[in-house]
Image: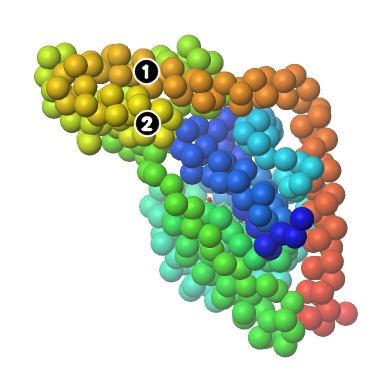
Amino acid sequence: MNKKGRVFSGARPTGRQHLGNYLGAVQNYVKLQDEYECIYCIVDVHALTTMETTKDLKSNSLEMALDWLAAGVRPEDTIIFIQSHVPEVMELHTMLSMVTPLGKLTDLPTFKEKVREQPNNVNYGLVGYPVLMAADILLYKANFVPVGVDQAPHIEFTREVARSFNFRYGKNVLVEPQMKVTEVPKVLGIDGQQKMGKSLNNHIEIASSPEETQARVMQMVTDPARIKRSDPGNPDVCNVFSMHKIFSSREDVEMVNVECRRAGIGCVDCKKLYAKNLNEHLAPLRERRTKLADDPQAIWDILDHGAQQARTIARQTMQEVRDAIGLP
Ligand code: TRP
């Protein structure tokens, strides 16, 4: 089939994916495969910029790959690999650093945020984070990069670096990518307040058991004004209702919408219904995941094969890059 161009995306190896990852990225990764040639990368080197320990790096990479594959990322069509398995990216990172004004990196909002978050670990890698990300994208000459809006400055930076490189060395070697903003609902954690995230422990993992899922759902914060069962609730401010809208049938959504407002259904039953629908939605994925997890070596083989495919592209680009620079 004729594809519409090449997509590249990367994600830090955060381990088992939660509903925020699933709705925000993974589902989109799966969909994009139909129309684009896709390359998905587990960016373990980027992870080092913020990590205190590397002890979970391997298992987190494997768990994330398992979730992606179980969700429908197809290694027959798509290149899926681990960033450090293609070391050419480090080389391109160095070459790009020569056309990157330092001030541009220290001005980025993402950098400033990290400085606030980890004032005692403002390492060199953190400053170069966007350069390495640009290297990821440019090494594979990606046309499109699906990311959340928070990554927009990094994509703009990538475009600028590509232009600077091509201009400086007088060759059109690097391809300016376009950002593909992933339009997703903001997924809140079970606290109903903050974005779902592992560090806040307010998340629901897609790979958890139906029982664990139900237990987590039962902890979800609902409309805070609804105290007694007999109080009418307001679905418009309820996080459980937001999730019903994603995972439940039209009939269930309509029923909850009506019955909550007139206290016909309580929060407990509403959550049970959501947990049931969520578990039903995730059942096929979980079944595939259990099978895949039976043979971890097969997953490492998929990642190795992906790295080989990625490396073929990477080597070609690096040859062009070296020639353009005029390295002896
Ligand atoms: N910076 C991205 C994030 O934090 C991860 C990332 C690294 C990435 N390299 C990339 C995303 C290349 C898209 C393309 O989410």
Q: Is residue 291 above or below residue 298?
A: above
Q: Which residue is disc 2 drawn over?
A: 250
Q: Nearer the viewer, mark 2 or mark 1?
A: 2
Q: Quadrant of residue 128?
A: bottom right
Mark 2 to mark 1 CA distance (whole Å):
13 Å
Q: Position of residue 260 (x, y in %)?
A: 21, 23
Disc 1 element = helix
Q: Is residue 24 above or below residue 213?
A: below
Q: Visible in this render: residue 59?
A: yes
> Which image quarter is the C terminus in?
bottom right
The residue drawn where x is 79% and y is 68% is 317
For the residue pair 55 and 187, the one nearer the viewer reads as 187
Left or right position of 324 against 202: right
Say which amino acid is labelled 2: Arg
Q: Quadrant of residue 223?
A: top left
Q: Position of residue 202 (x, y in %)?
A: 39, 29
Q: Position of residue 293 (x, y in %)?
A: 71, 22
The residue drawn where x is 33% and y is 19% is 271
Q: Position of residue 219 (x, y in %)?
A: 33, 19
Which residue ends up furthest to the top in the rendered image? 211
Report the disc number at residue 273. Answer: 1
Disc 2 element = helix
Say which amino acid is labelled 1: Leu
Q: Visible in this render: residue 228?
A: no
Label 1 near label 2: C-beta < 8 Å? no
